[in-house]
Amino acid sequence: MDRRTLAYAAALALVLLLIPIRSTKNVVAPPPEGSLRCAIPTHDDAFHRSLVKKYADDKGLDMNIVLCRDLSVLDSLRNGNLDLVVANDPPDSLLDGLATSRAFADGSVWAVREDEVEALRHINQWITELTASARFNRMQKRYFSGKTVSLTSISQYDNILRQSADSIGWDWRLLAAVVYHESRFHNDANSSKGALGLMQIRSKRYTAEMLLNPSANITVGSRYLKKLENMFSDTASDPVEATKFALAAYNMGEGKLVQLIEQAQEQGMDPSRWDNLKTMLPEGHHTRAYVENVLNTYSYYSKLYPR
């Protein structure tokens, strides 16, 4: 082989090395920017198709709906083929890796991946605003023949919630709202900080086995809420404000709330109202959102569920 042929062969080999090798693996493309891919059970088609369309319109998203017969479609949500799945009272065993919205009047929830924290926050806020709006009343008239939807159960733990709430003088629906925002009623919930169970309890006084018992967990959590309410009752302007203080302390810690009250006093602010104290927290602080969300959910439960 002469020099010219060798040079040509070397150049050709170099060109071939620089050409990228195309993978034969079939990879699902990520969802397009600004799209919402949603699966809806066939029996909920009309009602939830309308709801999802309103959500997509409000958020400026293109909507792509897939109808499904069962919850096997949740796997498609986990692997990223879907953004949202409408599920009717899904069991905890099917929700691994997922998070669910607050419930609609028909008992359905919207499921997203558990790392979609911001998306779930927007969905819950949207649901809160929607259910209090005139347009939702019009939807109820359309899909429920003008009847106000009233359900009899919030969760499978309602009896425990009623008993614990009675023992501390709370409305059981408020205690249910706390549990919802702590664990979404997932009894086996645990956090990276070691909080366990329905009310996300962290305590060295109790074993993990005890805290994963629904009755024990709700009993411990509700008694702590009552302790916090009593602790701040002298500072709060009235019982309603004392409850808000208890919720805030449950979320941020009683010591941090005490510091917040002391800072308010030093700055000449009225420390007896939560609306004043929360202004000293950053706009996006988790405790500001927590108190508001719990009270919004309580209001929602109060409209739909009997006392």
Image (tube, helix red, strand yellow):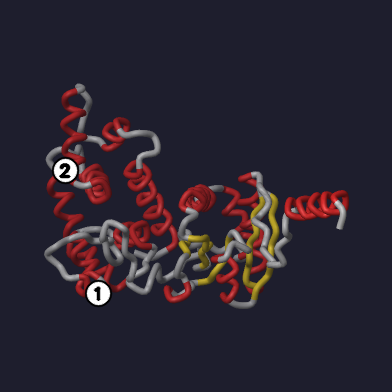
Residue 274: percent from left, percent from top: 27, 38
Residue type at mark 1?
Asn
Residue 99: percent from left, percent from top: 46, 62
Quarter of the view holding residue 186: bottom left
Residue nearest the observer in this picture, 202 or 157? 202
Quarter of the view holding residue 179: bottom left
Is residue 20 placed above or below 89 in the rendered structure? above
Mark pair 1, 2: CA separation: 28 Å
Residue nearest the observer in this picture, 109 or 169? 109
Horizontal side, residue 147 vs residue 207: left or right? right
Q: Residues within 10 Å of mark 1 (few under 14, many from 20)?
A: some
Residue in view at x 56 percent, y 71 percent = 75
Is residue 148 visible from the viewing direction of this image?
Answer: no
Residue labelled with disc 2? 255
Q: Which mark is residue 100?
A: none
Location of the C terminus (image quadrant): bottom left
Residue nearest the observer in this picture, 53 or 286? 286
Location of the N terminus (image quadrant): bottom right
Horizontal side, residue 63 vs residue 284: left or right? right
Residue in view at x 28 percent, y 31 percent = 276
Horizontal side, residue 8 vs residue 42: left or right? right
Q: Residues within 10 Å of mark 2 (few under 14, many from 20)?
A: few
Sequence-wise, the earlier of marks 1 and 2 is 1
Label 1, secondary structure: give it.
loop
Horizontal side, residue 17 vs residue 89: left or right? right
Residue 20: percent from left, percent from top: 73, 54
Of all residues shown, which one is farthest toward the top? 268
Residue type at mark 2?
Gly
Label 2, secondary structure: give it.
helix
Residue labelled with disc 1? 213
